[in-house]
Image (cartoon, coloured by chain):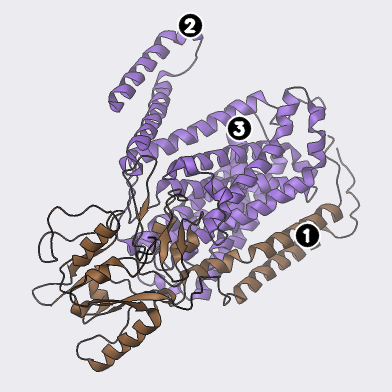
Chain colours: A purple, B brown
Amino acid sequence: MLELTFGIGFVGLLAWVVTQRSHLRLRVRLELVTVLLALFLGALYAIAKRVEGGLGAITHLSDQVPWGLWITFDLCGVALASGGFLIAATVHVLHLKRFEPILRPTVLTALIAYQLVAAVLVLDLGRPQRFWHPLIMWQHHSVMFEITLCLTLYTVVLMVEFLPAILERVGRPQLAEPLHRLAIPVVIAGVILSTLHQSSFGSLFLIVPQKLHPLWYTPWLPALFLVSAAAAGLAVVILESWLCSVFLQRQLPAVLIRELARACQWVLWGYVMLKVGDLAWRGRWMDFTKPTWLGVLWIVEVVGGVAVPAVWLGRAWRRRTARGLTGSAWLVIGGLALNRANISWFALIPAVGVVYVPSWMEVVITAALFVAGVAIFAAVSRLLPVFPRTDSTPA
Amino acid sequence: MATTPPVVTGVTRRQFLGTSAAAAAGLCVGGMASAAATPPQASGAERIGVLVDLTRCIGCRACVRACNDRNDLPQDPQPTSVWDGPAQTLTYQRWTVVNRIGQSTAQEGSSVKQQCLHCLEPACVSVCPVGALRQLDSGAVIYRQERCIGCRYCVFACPFGIPKFQWDSGVTPVIGKCQFCAQHATFDGPACVKACPTGALKFGTREELLFEARARLHARPDRYLNHIYGEQEVGGTSWLYLSGQPFERLGFPQGLPSVGLPRLTWVALKVLPAAVTVLAVIMSLASSLLPRRPPPSS
């Protein structure tokens, strides 16, 4: 029944778009429309099925593997959005006002990313309608409780940080005046909340020493999560600047991007030292003497996703090559995603003994939300004063 | 347009960053050093427990049926023993199972009862964000459905794989696990113990049961393996096992740390108040001491 409804809906909507295309002056590619329609209707179908038949009906999760793709997505999403608090602190705490032009795009990215993460988290709950329970039923020994509280409060902080853009657009910039005066305390609160929850996503896995492979299980997980998130957050700002210039014709100042690349390079080197030092401290070097696929994943993650981009970034910002910057930023982001996937997925496989592969519906819901996030960013950045003016007249 | 570098007053940014990094590192090291401190836990003087003597179990599954009856869980249409039918697995509505494990032509196996071991320091209780899982003073870990949000962190965290999730329920799934029968208003020992015809299950205080277990090991060293499973594992469990077969052959998790798992998380959680304070102080100082430079005017 559900399948039939959504099948008819898909065909109907597609037909409608095709017939109305010229009328609505939609200068869109038909194949793109088809893919997007299929994606969103697929996601809606999966959500309807989830409400009807439970998580078991749409996911490949089980009592052996109770967390899957969505948790990995959340771990990645939150880490990649860390640019929001880093740039805010740079501008308002370190008073490096020259970074102000990139603050709003970064805050908007973080705001959207956190909404996506929250949406996925709530969808992943067995009882989504009770998402508010942790906020009133405090259990302060639980990392999950602490993360929920921090995420909620930090979302409020991000909204306050972004509100001036909306007020300027509706022609009431004077209403933002009190917000500007509150900027420093709000940003400081944001940095504290971010430090807490970025590290606590690593603390989530401290409870499973018997499950998580020793290449990754370490009491320093929270610190490693925080530092890797910082590097990845900066890489996202670098990459975003390039993507925006290509697809949205909006540009972030190249000078600032090079400075970020320089900072990102040093964070990456620090992270390499932490990762290697941690293995040495725990004496786990011997794990590499016999080749295992997890050992290969560790090396790909740390060499390919951290060390190589650190070198590459260093060359790129000195030689001012855009390709080097974007290429190494991609590597950093890929390395972070691999790290989070290793910890929440692959490195659990030997102990659990069950290989989890997400269902198509898990993938489609994740992809649809991601696409929606990109679309919202594109729309908001056109509607609101998010990017610095590119014209030469002084503001 | 060339601008003159601004005059730096007070601390330089570099000095400042260095000092704050040192402070943050110091905080981390301090947190690690005091890892010995324990998270709070229920401190019942009279912790209850059950001694499971696998050498006395005949695999009749009377305990399973008694559990299902007492807790309103669905019964098997046909009563079975471990010798007929497929092995049973724990689910959200089957809180204990007994199976024949390790049986082969070469080796004698053993009937193994599985249920929640009621850890003295339960991982599930510590990870639950809403306190849906709760440890009573007696040590029994009970589940309060009305709080549960279905995040499944308990399922993920349990070292014994006990809590089970209701995967086929739309938006009202529950977690199912043995609650020692302590969730009922009247509690006089778990139903399974009363149903056991051979004395393979014995209910008492954990202290008494440990004494009893050691006495049995001492009296019949030929019959038992010299190991009380649950005495040390993850800081100790309320349910204790004696066996004639090696525990690893019977599917009992091996290599578990002998400290309570919640301590591993608490190390990170308890430094947070200090971290918040240090961060707040450092950043307030930074924002007031560091020189304010005008925004680029070019």
Q: Residue at x 44, y 39 (%)?
A: A366
Q: State the residue in front, A60 or A241.
A: A60
Both marks 2 and 3 on one chain: yes
The span from disc 2 to disc 1 (Cα, nearest Å) is 61 Å
Q: Locate the C terminus of chain B by quadrant.
A: top right
Question: Residue type at mark 1?
Answer: Val
- For the residues beneath circles 3 and 1, the answer to whether they share a chain is no
Specify few, some or many for label 2: CA neighbours under 10 Å numbering under 14, 14-19, or 20 or more. Answer: few
- Residue B147, horizontal then vertical, whole percent: 47, 50
Q: Residue at x 62, y 31 (%)?
A: A245
Q: Nearer the viewer, residue B25 or A301?
A: B25
Q: Of the residues under marks 2 and 3, which one precedes in the sequence?
A: 2
Q: Residue at x 48, y 60 (%)?
A: B127
Point out the residue furthest to the bottom here.
B219
Q: Callout 3, which amino acid?
A: Cys
Q: Give the spatial CA distance, label 2 vs label 3.
A: 29 Å
Q: Which mark is residue B281?
A: 1
Image side of residue B247 versus residue A216, left or right = left
Tell me the number on the disc at residue A23.
Answer: 2
**Place of residue A223 in the rendered image (x, y in percent of width and height, measured from the top left):** 59, 62
Q: Secondary structure at mark 2?
A: helix
Q: Position of residue B96 (x, y in %)?
A: 27, 63
- Residue extending furthest front? B186
Classed neighbour count for the residue bearing mark 1: other residues with Cα under 10 Å, few (<14), some (14–19), many (≥20): few
Against B264, is A17 above or below?
above
Q: Nearer the viewer, mark 2 or mark 3?
A: 2
Task: Answer few, some or many: residues within 10 Å of disc 3's Cα (few below 14, many 20 plus, some between 14 and 19).
Answer: some
The secondary structure type at the circle numbered 3 is: helix
Q: Quadrant of the N terminus of chain B?
A: top right
For disc 2, the chain is: A
Q: Residue beneath label 3, please?
A: A244
